[in-house]
Amino acid sequence: MTAQAISRERRYERKPALRRWLFVHKWSSLICTLFLLLICITGLPLVLRDEIDGLLDDALPYAQVAEGTPNVNLDRVVEAARKLYPGETILSVFVDDDEPKIMVFMASSWEAFRANRRSLHSIRFDAHTGDVLKQTKPFGEDGLTFLQLMLSLHRDMFAGLAGELFLGAMALLFVAAIVSGIAIYGPFMRKLDFGTVRAARSPRLKWLDLHNLLGVVTVGWALVVGTTGVINELSTPLFALWQQTDVRAMLAPLQGKPVPHTSELSSPQAAYDTVKAAFPDMTATSVVYPGSPFGSPFHYVVWTKGKEPLTSRLFSPVLVDARSGALVSAVTMPWYLRALELSRPLHFGDYGGMPLKIIWVVLDLVTIVVLGSGLYLWLARSPATRPERTVAAMPLPSPEGAE
């Protein structure tokens, strides 16, 4: 860095507002970078998780049937699951609308599931024949699959709620680094044409220009993914809040009444059909049994979604009386859970088919380069200029663009 550039940088740093932005950018970047690299690297396969899961799936193939063949009765599938695991509790039944499969999720009891959400296991049935295609063991008992490992690292680093909240805080720092980077980009880069990469200068200066350029190019995407990442990491406390407020108020009239025994439960297929008939413009996707920590002890919760590309990501629960099978009500989701639902497809880019997934992968790779180059710029500072280069970190432009 020349004496003139150092003088110009120090002049910028004397401006109180800019100095505050520099402070925010430096420390938010330094604190979150290593964790953001972990999130970006593990996020790559998760964008393509459906395709990877299909390649690695060792389940039996689906039966070849005539087009329009109806699904088997859910009651038959549930009975088959009970015969396979007598004495266990059925948690939910999921009906896939993309593939001809029905998933039954089970655990030794609701108490065991509440104590450890990873204690559940699943049985995959062919939706047309009712044949068992695959059975899984509780999470981790048979070793983690590649995607389970990536998802656990990406979501909570195997630390449960504490890990979710910690990574949410790191994502929030990432957003702060982006916003502060935008604030300091103009003052420090105004003497250079946009996109300038001074390749003939030192390697560090070349990487600085690339870091700044790639950071600005991806800034919009990074803000979206960072913000939605914060929201996603809050899913557990948000659902808990919903349970303690809206759901509790909804169930208040039933307090003190006996919870239905398994032998008293009405047909899950009837509950599924009742909801489909009542909401023909929606797709029923799953039936959650009474007792779920995300539902009601007195009702089946039938989750539905829209049929359009956007509304297919918006889920709404419908309550069906577990004893009588009568439709009770459609539950209006609070705004914060709607925000959570909208954030998920925006975060993973899985709502626009393969073209959008490829765009997400490319932008993720570019962000990894931005983060890695920022770390390099910080570590490669020369001893003589380190005090002046405190904002050459990541993930967006630093004052050395004024060289």
Image (spheres, grey):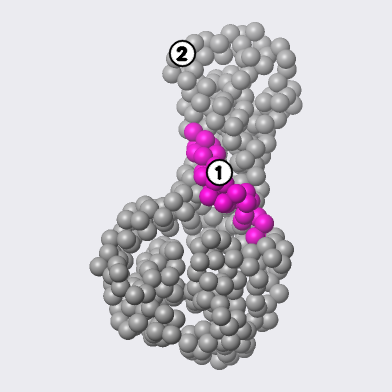
Residue range of the region highlighted in magenta in the rendering? 147-176
Location of residue 3 (image quadrant)? top right
Q: Tell me the residue at 62%/60% (across/down).
A: 48
- Please tell me how crowded label 1 is: few (under 14), some (14-19), or many (20+) other residues with Cα within 10 Å: many
Q: Give the amino acid type for the residue marked by disc 1 in the picture.
A: Leu
Secondary structure of the residue carrying tag 1 is: helix
Residue ID for mark 1? 167
Q: Is residue 172 magenta?
A: yes
**Disc 1 or 2, which lies upstream in sequence?**
2
Question: Is 154 or 37 nearer to us in this picture?
Answer: 154
**Which mark, by number, is residue 15?**
2
Q: Examine the rendering and report whether any part of residue 219 can be seen.
A: no
Asked if residue 353 lies in the magenta stretch, the reply is: no
Asked whether 302 or 195 is in front, the reply is: 302
Work out which quarter of the rendered image holds the C terminus and state it. top right
- Image quarter in which the N terminus is found: top right
Give x and y (percent) for residue 104: 54, 77
* Label number found at residue 220: none
